[in-house]
Amino acid sequence: MPTSSIVATRKTRATSVLSHVTDGSNMFDELHSNLQSPTQFISIYNQYYQSVTARSIIVTILCNILTIENVDRKIQLFIIDCLISNRDNLSEIQFKQDLLPFIKQIFTTKDDDDDDNKDLLLSTIRLFVVLVEHRSTILSLTLAEWLSYLLNFLATNLSSTTYLVYGELIDDLISKIVKQFPPLSKDVIEILGRSSSLSFIISTNFLHQLKSWIQNSDDTRLAFFTIHLWESLACLLCRLIIRGHVKGNEILAVIEDAFIVQNYSIRSAAFTSWSSFMSYIHRLDDIDSQLLNSRLLKLFLTPFLSDSTSKSKSASIAKCRAWITLISMYPKNINDVILPFLSFAFGN
């Protein structure tokens, strides 16, 4: 066929597609008939996507396809990437009815040797990062549900090797969750507890594992990752800590040894994280002044009074900055805050 005829045929095809963009069933049928043919599926998508008015319909169809079993993995991966790009067209209902069941399936499927599954998992986490940062309103009503999937995945899949694969994304995601959503309420914590996901994430075994990673001077990258993860989890679950819950105390115990570990880089990271943790709690609207000036002050002071960082400039600077954060919170507390800081900075 002459080149001009091929071009004409393609133009005719594109014109025909664009002339029927309002017909959602037409798009639905064409895409659904190619769920095992990634190349053809993507080609059809690209033709329809040329029309701006068709995009919301396309997103609806893509979300629906994710609820179907036995769809080619490459197509699922393509759909997730499309939803990341078209996040503004996603609705709360679509997330709840179509995306949540798919996300649950991805987070509960464990196959470390399947590269397609690993790529799909990473893309799903990226989608979550984008939605939490830019479309948090469509996630609010299902917070307990999707968070349970995430925490369960984290507690059952995170290891000293898998963190290299998705640890950075997980850390970014939980950090953004902390920024976009308030600390988990008692009601949400109870819901998570019933789903067992919270039990996993605050289980003694998992917390002991985090603690051992922080103490691992042979793998500082793992220690730094764990400290950042601890900070996000401690902020997210700070209600347990503030209430003096036994699990809150276990969460605090994870970071304790980081302030006295022999590796000063780890100490420095721990004080930086502690500074952020103190600031986060201090900004909470529902913390009364009596609690802030009694039990919480005692809690905040704990790492400052037991550590000596004079042998390391970087650790001393990090500790000094954390002290300054504490002073900004208690500027009038001479005996408990100001004098101990002066002693640290200038000696007795």
Image: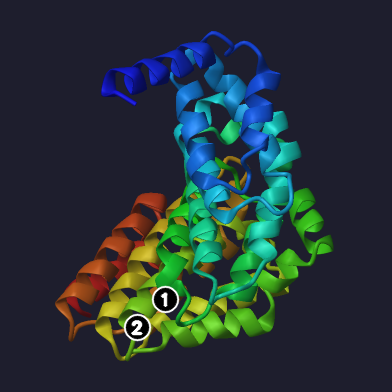
Q: Position of residue 185 (x, y in %)?
A: 71, 49
Secondary element at tag 1: helix
Q: Quadrant of residue 21?
A: top right
Q: Quadrant of residue 142?
A: top right
Residue at point 48% right, 60% down? 119
Which residue is disc 2 drawn over?
307
Give the colour scheme shown.
Answer: rainbow
Residue at point 63% right, 44% down? 35
Q: Position of residue 175 (x, y in %)?
A: 47, 53
For the residues labelled 1 and 2, the Cα–Cα distance comes to 6 Å
Which residue is disc 1 drawn over?
303
Residue at point 73% right, 44% down? 67
Where does the N terminus fall, quadrant-wise? top left
| Amino acid at pointer 1 | Pro
For the residue pair 75 and 284, the one nearer the viewer reads as 75
Q: Which mark is residue 62?
A: none
Q: Is residue 266 left or right of residue 295?
A: left
Q: Is residue 71 above or below residue 139?
A: below
Q: Quadrant of residue 181?
A: top right
Say if residue 243 shows up in the picture. Answer: yes
Say if residue 283 shows up in the picture. Answer: no
Residue at point 41% right, 18% down? 9
